[in-house]
Image: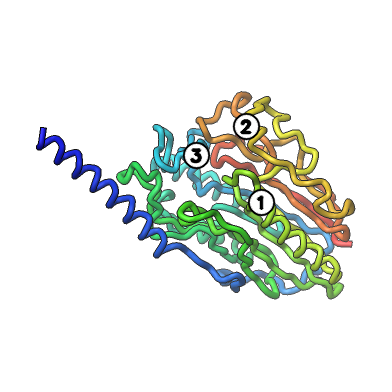
Amino acid sequence: MKTIRKIFLWAIGLFVAYIAFVLIFGTLTDFQPDYVLDIETHQEGRNEVIEDSVLSFVIWNLGYAGLGEESDFFYDGGGMFSSGGHMVRPSKDISQKNLDGIMTWGANTQADFFLIQEIDVSSKRSYRSNQFDLMARQLDGYYAGFSVNYQSPWVPIPIFEPWNTYGKTKSGLGTYSGFQPESATRYQLPGEYGWPIRIFQLDRCAAVFRYKTANEKELVVVNIHNSAFDKGGKLKKEQMDFLRDFFLAEYQKGNYVVAGGDWNQCPPFFKKDGFVRDKERAAELTNIDPNFLPEDWQWVYDPTMPTNRSVRNPLELGKTFVTIIDFFLISPNVKVLKVEGMNMDFQYSDHQPVKMEVELN
């Protein structure tokens, strides 16, 4: 009995030591970016001035090429401590299949601007592929800027599965344009989770790019990826309040504003479970307040095409919960000409791209 008791106490002691190490290591290595950072240029754009008033934009959250049709994801069910048998990382073959499909899409899609979310540059979950650089090669002649929002030498979740952790992660927003921006700035979005959860979460940001137009106004393009796992919506509100003030200030200067990406919310008035009925999943989502901005601002999306699926289980078309959380926002001096959700059947990501064409008035 004494031997069993000693083994038990040793096991408890090792477990406590491991948890302490996780918390100390995570706190000491927690990514703490400055509020405002210049975004490094990785590739130059072709033109310095936008001459044409008609422009096209594409948004897509790539899910780091790890959340394709075969995937379920441990964290979607709140599994910080245990994977519960769900996927932590895809197999290398599945990751490569997704990446190949994404790159083929990039090479074959025409647009002036690509606003990409969850694109990895060096992560264990994506087998250390530099997805940002690979996409830049597909978009030869485009400006390329990367804004990090998830960086850690070791993400130790699921905490109770040290042999199966997320590992090293570096990921963020990739922005590509046929034009060279006058400036490119990363703004840290306000609000954060309490300790210790914050050391495992993304550091949400807005990537802001300013372009010179022929009429001497600025086109301000904002790449968005707001908080997801936010019970009560406190973080989303802080982030959205910041963005609203930013958008209005830019428009009051006479600038054009185009923002797009993964808002992790549904557009105003959009029926959250309009594609597949699921009251439980719909209740986890929120709609953006219709009064968030004056009514002459426009939320732009294709109501016929879902952009996001649940990753609690592998995809079953027609059964898996899908909705719209990826879309654009344009200022009153921008006119939408066309918007189209691009149907990929969620083969390569848990999100789908959206393409928009606008005219600057």
Label 2 sits on a secondary structure element that is: helix
Relative depth, front residue between 318 and 79: 79
Residue denoted by label 2: 281
Q: Where is residue 107 shown, x and y percent of the image?
A: 59, 52
The relative height of residue 263 versus residue 74 in the rendered view (above or below) is: below
Which image quadrant is residue 242 in? bottom right
| Three-letter code for the amino acid on which mark 1 is drawn | Lys
Mark 1 or mark 3, which is nearer the start of the sequence?
Answer: 3
Spatial CA distance of label 1 from label 2 is 18 Å
At 63% from the left and 24% from the top, the residue drawn is 318
At 77% from the left and 73% from the top, the residue drawn is 212
Image mark for residue 78: 3
Relative depth, front residue between 189 and 73: 189
Spatial CA distance of label 2 from label 3 is 13 Å
Q: Where is residue 186 shown, x and y percent of the image?
A: 62, 67
Mark 2 and mark 1 in contact (Cβ < 8 Å)? no
Q: Where is residue 97 shown, x and y percent of the image?
A: 47, 42
Q: Residues within 10 Å of mark 1 (few under 14, many from 20)?
A: many
| Three-letter code for the amino acid on which mark 2 is drawn | Arg
**Quick check: can you spot residue 117?**
yes
Image mark for residue 236: 1
At 88% from the left and 60% from the top, the residue drawn is 333
**Quick check: can you spot residue 141?**
no
Mark 3 or mark 2, which is nearer the start of the sequence?
Answer: 3
| Three-letter code for the amino acid on which mark 3 is drawn | Gly
Mark 1 and mark 3 in contact (Cβ < 8 Å)? no
The relative height of residue 260 versus residue 286 in the rendered view (above or below) is: below
Which image quadrant is residue 51 in? bottom right
Q: Quadrant of the C terminus?
A: bottom right
